[in-house]
Image (cartoon, rainbow, N blue to C red):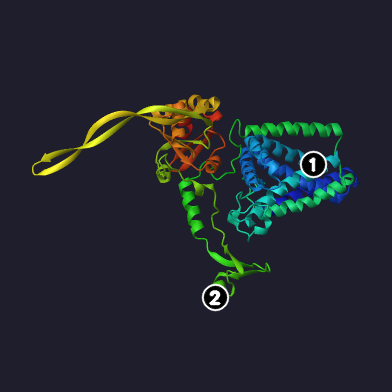
Amino acid sequence: MTLATLIIMFAIAGAILTALIGFSKGGKINWLVSFLQNFTGTWFIFSGAVKAIDPLGTAFKMEQYFAEFVRAFEGTWLSFLVPVFPKLSTASATFSVAMVTLEIIVGLALILGGRNKLTSWVFLITLAFFTFLTGFTYLTGYVPDGVNFFDVGKWGPYVETNMKVTDCGCFGDFIKLKPYTSFIKDLFLLIPAFIFVFRSKKMHSLFTAPVRNVVLSLTTVGTVLFCLSNYIWNEPIVDFRPFKNGVNIRERKLAEEEAAGAVQITAYRLKNKSSNQVVELPYEQYLKEFKNYPKEEWTAEQVKSEPTIPHTKISDFDIQDVQGNNVTEQILTLPEYTFMLVAYKLYGKNSGKETISMPDTIYGVDSLRVGDSLQLKPKVLSVANKQVEKDLYEWDSNYAARWSKVVNPVIQAAEKDKVRTFAITGFEDPGKIDDFRHTVQSAYPFLTAEDIMLKTIMRSNPGVVLLKNGTIVQKWHYKQLPSYEEIKAKFMK
């Protein structure tokens, strides 16, 4: 589904609602304002609903924004805001649920009417916030590495890879919009937002105030509970992510890599540094005429064809052991059922250091004559203890219990049945990983990977994935994890 398709759907829904409202009120409405209420209201409800299916995905996206805001605002007149963003990042899930709920409630309030002046201002402020996010995302494409976002004079030509937040998450993982498209979309929606502010008296109202209040209150409670059910108690009810049940990771990864390798340069977009004139030349023509566009006067940007298979986080499925050896191929070619435990982060902190004694053997060389030759062999000269500093960690007890009391009993039963298990976590110090593994008494090995990729696989931490020959058979939130006997009976056939 594309954005154009969605716009047509929202327009149709808005037109139908407007016709029904106009009929019920005997035509005594402002048809344009009423249509815009229904159109934007439907838009906000849908946008909020797809994010409510996966609120943790929105939370992860906001964490990216908050981190980028810290970098952008440091050293500027907005630096007083910098301490706020790390605090918001730690509460990103709560922020996400609140934002999603507000979006749905504002959309419903637009359709219902009532308190139209308040609704108009809330809609405008909410949309202004979204526009800031999408605008920031798109405009960072003009900011080269090492240049602050607010140092506009040092901006260069638009380069997509300059963007640190690659999409705004406007429709979650349901539809991925290009940053420019998202930005233009929000600028377009600002038009009805200002109309509402200045023409709030022309907006329609449905039902009585008590009925509207009851509907909005019940929707608020229902939305919050629905959001919580999609990450605290279970995985998202609908999986819009690339790592779905039934997907063969190895085959998809190879297909995406081949498609990316087949991308061709179709043209060059040239921009004059002095006049800002933009010229786009087909690839073959540029090869003939590039001398007419010296680098001192022009910047050149490649225009490439779109890959036949879009890039997803499956392309980033790259697993290493704690020594740094790549083990991706070994994992994806295991022919038997295998449990993969996913934890994008291990919740604990460094609590200091302790000094421990370790044996330190000092070797010398002993000579041994064999016939006419002289052979050398190692000789133990002395064994002494050396003092070594070791990091200490304090692990979140509730988090550790998820492993030791929920996940590990299932895995232990599986291991007795000769089923292989491994865990994957974000890149961490090997000593920290080993300390956690011993704390929760996990006999299986821990591997490492990019945390964003792991967040895409599972929203649950930890989450359990059943693999076979690179195919995702089933995924479970740790709170919904069945016994091994149930898993074996239903999924391991």
Q: Is residue 284 above or below residue 3?
A: below
Residue 245, x across and y down, in percent:
52, 41
Name the residue tied to disc 1.
Answer: 122
Q: Are marks 1 and 2 in contact (CB under 8 Å)?
A: no
Residue 94 seen in this snapshot: yes
Q: Position of residue 292 (x, y in %)?
A: 58, 75
**Which residue type carries mark 2?**
Lys
Q: Nearer the viewer, residue 45 or 373?
A: 373
- The mark total stands at 2
Seen from the viewer's position, the closer of residues 406 and 166 is 166
**Res. 440 in view:** no
Q: Residue at x 48, y 32 (%)?
A: 490
Instruction: Decide which of tag 1 and tag 2 comes sooner along the chain.
Output: 1
Residue at 58% x, 67% y is 268
Determine whether, in the image, residue 485 is placed left or right of residue 479: left
Q: Which residue is mark 2?
A: 288
Q: Residue 399, image x and y in percent?
A: 54, 28
Other residues around mark 2 within 10 Å, as few (<14) / some (14–19) / many (≥20): few
Rounded to the nearest angstrom, the CA distance separating label 1 from label 2 is 55 Å
Q: Amino acid at mark 1?
A: Val
Q: Is residue 261 left or right of residue 56?
A: left
